[in-house]
Amino acid sequence: MLQIAGLRKCYGDFSLDDVSLQVPEGCVVGLVGANGAGKSTIIKCILGLTQPDSGSIRLFGEELAGMSQADFVQARSRIGVVFDTCAFPDVLSVREAARIASRAYPAFDCGLFDSLADRLGVPCKKRVKELSRGTGMKLSIALALAARPELLILDEATAGLDPLARGEVIGLLRDCMLQAEEEGCGVRGILMSSHISEDLEKLADYVVCLDEGKVVFSVEACQITDSAGVAHCTHSDLERVRCSDLGQLGALRVLQRPYCIDVLVPDRQAFALVFPDIAIERVGLDEYLAFFLKGDVL
Amino acid sequence: MEILVSNGSDLPIYEQIASQIKNAILSGDLEPEQKLPSIRSLANGLGVSVITTKRAYADLEAAGLIYSVQGKGSFVRGGSVQFLREERLRCIEDLLSRSLEEAKGAGISLEELHQMLELLAEGE
């Protein structure tokens, strides 16, 4: 659905450097990284809001750079976008906002918008400025989904939502993808940039991490949640690990803690078999990130 | 169908799913030709990635326990119960041989082993 290869964009003191990522059909790709790492820049390039210096972006199989204006508008209408702020003037009522959106997006389905707004609890008569931050986000999501996009791009779209609301949104996104599979049309791919690891752990199939414009890792989400582990080591434990086959194999990442050294291990079951006496546990996405952004290679 | 996955388990989630489906087939909770949930609806229901459920189903298919029909879904393969029972019998035979070996090595008689087995069964 979306294929980015070798993307480069220079902004002076910041540049995207050789970024490659894909959103395969039927998949949710999570994009993580510190603020300013380049996540929003990538999204802007995908939406044609900014021109990359070099590299390729293929949307629905077609190269973005070579598209005619008409083709681009067509492709763009198949993408739904949700940013972290509601894009509509706040004096409008929800219903008016929906009407404007229906003019902008040819596939906008008003009936679908009504049922999504209902499901998410967005009151149609209220003005946008009267909505709480969380409800404003839900409105943005409902508007985006009502246009029946095939590719959905979410840029920090669940920020500002309370845990229950986030759960509702995640559930909604899951249902959308299931419906798309069963009915043959609808959201078939999602690219979501988020700081909320819990959401990504639940929804993402792949996780791509960006740091200072470069891709630091790109893995299956279950590699992080299911296979990887963090081992809590003393200095002597660390030496044993370093000298073992596991230590020689790949670059193990370590984080110095106040009272021990944490080691990121790609396969915690295998590690536990070789070192049954070293405490090892599942690693969350936040910690996994920390190993790559703040840790060192063993 | 009930499936329980635990992040705290030693087993990877795809293995937990596959082994629970296997057990359900063996116990008859899942019947031959019964349709399984789609890969995505199972993933949604368990809160895991489709990659995980896809892998579980792929493993079950490779083990000959389920089969998939493009566009229709995945189904329990008939004859799986037999097949799994054979597998379990082989496993138990293995364990029993090892127990016999240990008993021999420790000079424990066959009669004592029988008694042990009965006591254990009673305790269940």
Image (cartoon, coloured by chain):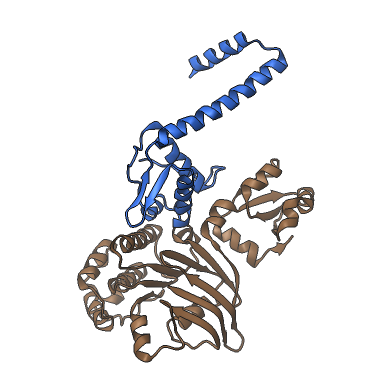
Furthest residue toward top:
B111
* Percent coordinates x, y for residue A134 in the rendering: 36, 67
Q: Quadrant of the C terminus of chain A?
A: bottom right
In front of the other: A10 or A148:
A148
* Percent coordinates x, y for residue A166 in the rendering: 39, 61
Which quarter of the picture shows residue B71?
A: bottom left
Q: Quadrant of the N terminus of chain A?
A: bottom left
User: Does residue A49 sit above or below A160 in this rendering?
Assistant: below
* Percent coordinates x, y for residue B29 in the rendering: 35, 35
Left of B52 or right of it: where is A172? Answer: left
Left of A12 or right of it: where is A147? Answer: left
Q: Which chain is blue?
A: B
User: Does residue B116 sit above or below A46 in this rendering?
Assistant: above
- Looking at the image, which residue is at 50% across and 17% down? B121
Q: Do we see residue A37 in this rendering?
A: no
Furthest residue toward bottom:
A69
In front of the other: B34 or A85:
B34
Which quarter of the picture shows residue A76?
A: bottom left
User: Does residue A41 sit above or below B117 in this rendering?
Assistant: below
In front of the other: A261 or A207:
A207
- Looking at the image, which residue is at 50% across and 61% down? A197
Q: Do we see residue A69 in this rendering?
A: yes
Q: Which chain is brown?
A: A
* Percent coordinates x, y for residue A147 in the rendering: 29, 74
The number of callouts visible is 0
